[in-house]
Image (spheres, helix red, strand yellow):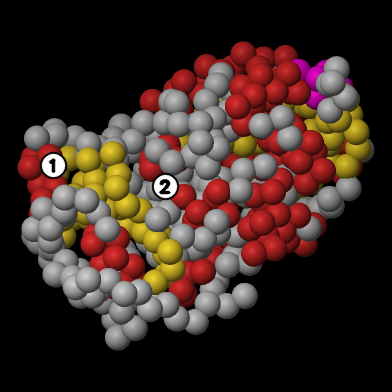
Amino acid sequence: MRLEQTNITLEGGLNYDFPHMVEVEQHFPRKRVLDIEQTIRFEMEKIDGTALAGKRIAITAGSREIAELVDILHGIGVLLQSWGAQPFTVPAMGSHGGATAPGQVQILEGVGITEESIGMPILSSMATVEVARFEDGTPLYCDRLAFEADGIVICNKIKPHADFKGDYESGLIKMLTIGLAKHKGATALHAHGFDRFHEVLPNAARLMLDKLPVVFGVAILENSFHELMAVEIIPPTKIMAREKELLVEAKHNIARLLLPVIDLLIIDEIGKNISGEGMDPNVTGRPGSGLTEGFESPAIQKIVVLDVTDVSQGNGVGIGMADITTMPCVNKLDFNAMYTNAVTATILDPAKIPLAMNNDREALALALRTCNRVTPQTARIVRIKNTMNLNRIMVSEACLPAVEANERLSIISTPQALSFDSSNRLLGNSIV
């Protein structure tokens, strides 16, 4: 399907006198790891390397863009090899990549993970093995290649989930039970619904940890600047307890929008490398599951999404949580990949198509004209590159009183007009 053009009859048309914008810095804590290699070596001292000699070890890698993940995987692989082990990486991302083995390898390549960059083979397959079952009969699956290895290393970033809240959200437990379970296993668990995931995931993880040869977990935490804040090796017997503690720390260090009220939020790009829902509901307050409890965000009238990252390979899941997008953005979508992802998760709203305008200028004009109680002079507009990079944002002049009243916000530019190219595409996509 390809959309060509839309013509909306609107009183006053789509001409709009956009307000000027100001660049603003949001101040967040910035704890970070400075020497990755040394940190990895120190953490790996927790492991008895002599017990791994001659053994094939599968290391998981997911679809998210995680700070320094290439160096982390490379460092762990080098040490395992020095101990005589034979490490390899398996894509562990449920149904992502169109639920195909080549597609999942391409996702890894998109975030810089190749056999050359991590110094070990990447083995990809959608074949699974049933490992255990819930009492109600729900099967739990594991990637066959990982299952047949002598040991498994569960590696993932620990962070708040995009659809539900609990003691375990997105981290080692989810990687073990959803990512490593491939399309078949992800489908089986998602059938329980996100409203039960706070119980389903830990229950599944306990069974999987009991059945699988997990050698250790690699917990990764990022700061608000998408920088490596911590990396920790966790023995399998301590994964459940330690992840629960690390999630609390992760939630204290995520980036947010610090303004209380926003009329229009402009998001330059969404993508699977940014969030499971393309744009993080922990920033927008719009989870596709509808389970809004625990999601803190400003009051936002309208959200406009302008693009989908190339790394996402057309999987624009999450675009349905926007109000307006553009024809060029919609025409980049791979509906097979996006629908597969949404259907597997059993929540369909993120894959719906918002109002699609002909270009960026029309999309912004329509959004502002449909905001209530707003004029060009009073419109509180915020523009971000994506929901992962929030240390610098653009705000309209109507936001400045709120900026000046918040010590965690500072103005770093003079007012400037929104600018568009000859195709009416919004320019200035350099804020990070």
Label 1, on which residue? 403
Which disc, if any, is residue 388? 2
Which secondary structure, mark 2? loop
Residue 252, percent from left and from top: 38, 25
In which quadrant will I find the C terminus?
bottom left
Which disc, if any, is residue 424? none
Residue 273, percent from left and from top: 54, 52
Badge 1, how many Cα within 10 Å: few under 14, some, many 20+? many
Task: Give amino acid for label 2.
Answer: Met
- Left or right: residue 224 compared with residue 72: left
Task: Give amino acid for label 1.
Answer: Val
Residue 206, percent from left and from top: 76, 18
As measured in the structure, the alpha-carbon distance from the residue carrying label 1 to the one carrying label 2 is 20 Å
109 relative to 9, above or below: above
The residue at 66%/32% (across/down) is 193
Question: Quick check: can you spot residue 298?
Answer: yes
Q: Which residues are magenta?
A: 206-211
Question: Quick check: can you spot residue 271?
Answer: no
The residue at 52%/77% (across/down) is 3
- Left or right: residue 339 compared with residue 67: right
Is 387 contained in the magenta span?
no
220 relative to 376, above or below: above
Quadrant of residue 292 within the rendered picture? top left
Which secondary structure, mark 1? helix
- Left or right: residue 380 compared with residue 85: left
Residue 368, percent from left and from top: 24, 60
Badge 2, how many Cα within 10 Å: few under 14, some, many 20+? many
The residue sitting at the bottom extreme is 422
Quadrant of residue 78 within the rendered picture? top right
The residue at 70%/23% (across/down) is 200
Quadrant of residue 414 within the rendered picture? bottom left
Does the magenta stretch mainly form a helix, a strand or a loop? helix
